[in-house]
Image (cartoon, rainbow, N blue to C red):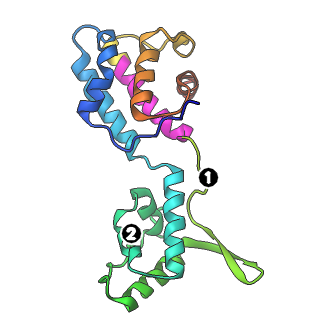
């Protein structure tokens, strides 16, 4: 049984260069260095876009610890994703952001309890009585799964733009159906390097559709 690739959370320039070596010759006119730099930026942007599953997992863990506060809450808050931090600070709300309070000392139990109470007020949207307890619905996304289509489209869009510029050619109708075409092969290499378990055909189709007026 083939295991699904594990999504990468980082990819160095050296790793990217190694991954792209088999398709380097597909970029004509000595434009590979420029194309490579643009792809590197595209991947950096893609990796900086936090997955809903990551955010949901962080919120659930924060909520769990806040119910019985201890010093591990401080470590989690120091390492949460940018999206989770923005949600906690309410940067998506019309009334503006409310920065998280300064983290207390690990030995300051009263400070940690106060922080946990503050976080709970930010993180719980609504409560529902469940026999002997109250179940809360949390802010943010709740679904887990493969990379979101929107997030993947960002990567395909930037790579496509880089390829069009480097190869001096426009979008082609057969990009999504002909696996032998350069762009299709380049995208397959990048998906493999990033551990993306998704169809390149479908990703290209969505990108082309998004460009249709």
- Viewed as shown, does residue 30 lie left or right of 55? left
Q: How many marks?
A: 2
The secondary structure type at the circle numbered 2 is: helix
Q: Residue at x 30, y 29 (%)?
A: 16
Q: Position of residue 107 (x, y in %)?
A: 31, 87
Residue 93 appears in view: no
Q: Is residue 72 above or below residue 209?
A: below
Q: Residue at x 33, y 89 (%)?
A: 108
- Viewed as shown, does residue 17 lie left or right of 82? left
Label 2: which residue? 77
- Report the residue that reaches farthest toward the front: 1
Q: Which mark is residue 143?
A: 1
Q: Is residue 40 above or below residue 166?
A: below
Residue 177 appears in view: yes
Q: Is residue 25 magenta?
A: no
Q: Position of residue 194 (x, y in %)?
A: 41, 34
- Viewed as shown, does residue 194 lie left or right of 105? right
The secondary structure type at the circle numbered 1 is: loop
Dot placed on the residue nearer the N-terminal end, 2 or 1: 2
Q: Which residues are magenta?
A: 147-163
């Amino acid at each position: 049984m083939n295991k699904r690739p594990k999504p990468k959370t980082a990819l160095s320039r050296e790793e990217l260069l190694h991954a792209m070596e088999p398709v380097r010759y597909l970029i004509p006119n000595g434009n590979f260095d420029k194309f490579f730099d643009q792809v590197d930026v595209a991947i950096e942007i893609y990796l900086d876009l936090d997955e809903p599953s990551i955010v949901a997992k962080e919120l659930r863990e924060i909520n769990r610890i806040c119910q019985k506060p201890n010093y591990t809450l401080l470590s989690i808050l120091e390492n949460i994703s940018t999206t989770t931090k923005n949600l906690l600070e309410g940067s998506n709300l019309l009334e503006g952001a409310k920065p998280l309070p300064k983290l207390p000392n690990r030995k300051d139990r009263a400070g940690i309890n106060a922080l946990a109470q503050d976080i709970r007020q930010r993180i719980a949207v609504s409560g529902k009585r469940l026999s002997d307890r109250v179940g809360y619905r949390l802010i943010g996304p709740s679904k887990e799964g493969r990379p979101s289509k929107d997030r993947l489209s960002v990567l395909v869009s930037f790579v496509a733009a880089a390829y069009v510029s480097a190869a001096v050619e426009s979008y082609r109708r057969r990009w999504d159906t002909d696996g032998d075409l350069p762009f299709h092969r380049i995208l397959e290499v990048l998906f493999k390097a990033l551990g993306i378990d998704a169809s390149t055909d479908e990703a290209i189709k969505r990108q082309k559709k998004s460009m249709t007026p």
